[in-house]
Amino acid sequence: MEGEAMPRVPEPEVIICGAGAAGLTLAIDLARRNIGFLLIDKAAGPFRGSRGKGIQPRSQEVFEDLGVIDRIVASGGEYPVQRFYTDEGPVDRSAFELSGPTPEEPYQIPLLVPQFLTERCLRERLAELGHAPLYGHELTGIDQDDDGVSARIATPSGERTVRAAYLVGADGGSSFVRKSLDIGFPGRTLGVRAVVADVRADGVSTDAWHRWGEGTDTQVSLCPLYGTDMFQYVGPVPFDVDIDVSAAGLTALFHERTGRTDIVVREVSWASVFSMNARLADTYRIGRVLLTGDAAHVHPPTGGQGLNTGVQDAYNLGWKLAAVLDGAPDPLLASYEQERRPIAEAVLGLSERLLEAAKSRFTSRGREVSQLDLGYADSPLTIATPHRDKGPLAGERAPDAPVTGAGGLDTRLFSLFQGPHWTLLGYEADRTAAPTARKGLHIHTTGPRGDLNDAGGHFRDAYGLAAGQWVLVRPDGYMAAIADLHTIEAHLDAVGLRTGGASPGWR
């Protein structure tokens, strides 16, 4: 199906422009919600570079929910030790200062997975759900009205116009969608130009991320790309010089900078020379057209934040699009920008700070890059938690915890969260007082007649709960409320989870 003319299928509800990590994540989320969509990309085929190679712990949790974490872990590996070559000899330092997994945070260590392998895993998952990207399909025009969007698409068999309720631009930093809407993209060039390439090289070991000239304009590094037989070659380069990215050219640059003639680049699989930028779109939405991923924000590569932020954009957007298409009030969709744009703004600042730190020697990164502490405390979807002196607050990421089902089998809260639904957890609560069953809501309780046992106290400790308290967890794994049942039921009505009849609207 890839690269072929669009099949004659019912008109989609959503058109996704761009089949990178963000577009694929959104497509998977819509597919599992039975939302019709069209995923297009103007490229002739999948991206084949390693560029966004870091998968942060929060993205690993997202990928678990989407059903791809195990194959992504199997595709790459943990970051190797950083080996700095100095005048006094090599110095090894860990790339990250992170602790091991805990019951609340099962993923704590960033993964090194070349971007093309991550995207391959996402395409495989999408195929399992019955869909595939259409390559060689270029968006050439957008017209929208109050009822939907008409997209003009150049396909291998000619131009076609497709009508949908919404269109999402996941088409990268030079986004056609963003430019078509005339959305400003302010920011700045960070004064760094770099070459990045995927290479096969002789004379270098795969047990370390090798770094020469750290903290200078002539630094260069070779990082093994686990899951492949290649290294990622990275180094700053001058702005006013043409860079030869052939194997011979990269070898010559390497020899000039390191003096190591025993290491030779023998093949270049992919290469790019780029200027580092930090930019943020003025808005993520105009009418029925939305932006996600690099189309909405571009980051310097330091800290491995760009791909992760884009994936989490799409994860935030997918369930909201599906809900509004199913009759939920539009302000639910408006919360996408309200929640995600401040995150991108904060992450851009982090990336810039890490870039400055990277200019000094021996940098390592800690919890700040994990994205586990990002949340939506100020969101209109969050009911503030007053008078709470322990445990996480509403708007924060919902922790994991091991529990035992009433039938005797061990499970985890993340396993109960997995899927497109909301989850309501009652701690030592009266099951008979739980809300009426609703489409899209799963209810679990501990206590008498509860379906869960918290014998180890991990659920209680992770959430800081007292007997009789309830926690409402959104489809994307953030807590919407820690509240009484009356408050929670009103919130469920407001976000479109109905017991029957029309939604009473946003409150």
Image (spheres, grey):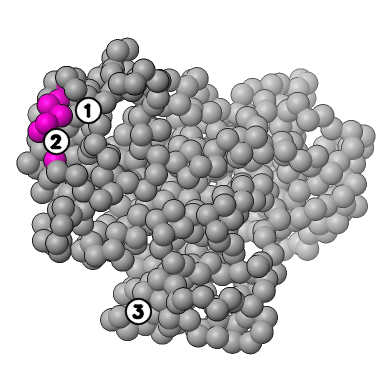
Q: Residues within 10 Å of mark 3 (few under 14, many from 20)?
A: some
Q: Nearer the viewer, mark 3 or mark 1?
A: 1
Whether 396 is drawn above or below 388: the answer is below
Q: Quadrant of the N terminus?
A: bottom right
Whether 212 is drawn above or below 235: the answer is above
Image location (x, y in percent) of residue 420: 37, 48
Image location (x, y in percent) of residue 140: 54, 82
Return the disc, 3 or 1, that comes first in the chain's sequence: 3
Q: Residues within 10 Å of mark 1 (few under 14, many from 20)?
A: many
**Is 375 left or right of 221, judged from the image as shown?**
left
Of residues 42 and 35, the one drawn nearer to the viewer in this rendering: 35
Residue 223 lies in quadrant = top right
Residue highlighted by disc 1: 445
**Which amino acid type is shown beneath numbered disc 2?**
Ala
Residue highlighted by disc 2: 434
Determine if residue 300 is in view: no
Residue 286 lies in quadrant = bottom left
Q: Nearer the viewer, mark 3 or mark 2?
A: 2
Q: Which residues are magenta?
A: 428-435
**Is 423 left or right of 73, judged from the image as shown?**
left
**Is 75 left or right of 152, judged from the image as shown?**
right
Residue highlighted by disc 3: 148
**Which amino acid type is shown beneath numbered disc 1?**
Thr
Whether 26 is drawn above or below 436: the answer is below
Residue 285 lies within the magenta run: no
Q: Residues within 10 Å of mark 2 (few under 14, many from 20)?
A: some
Q: Mostly what secondary structure, the magenta segment? A: loop
**Which amino acid type is shown beneath numbered disc 3?**
Gly
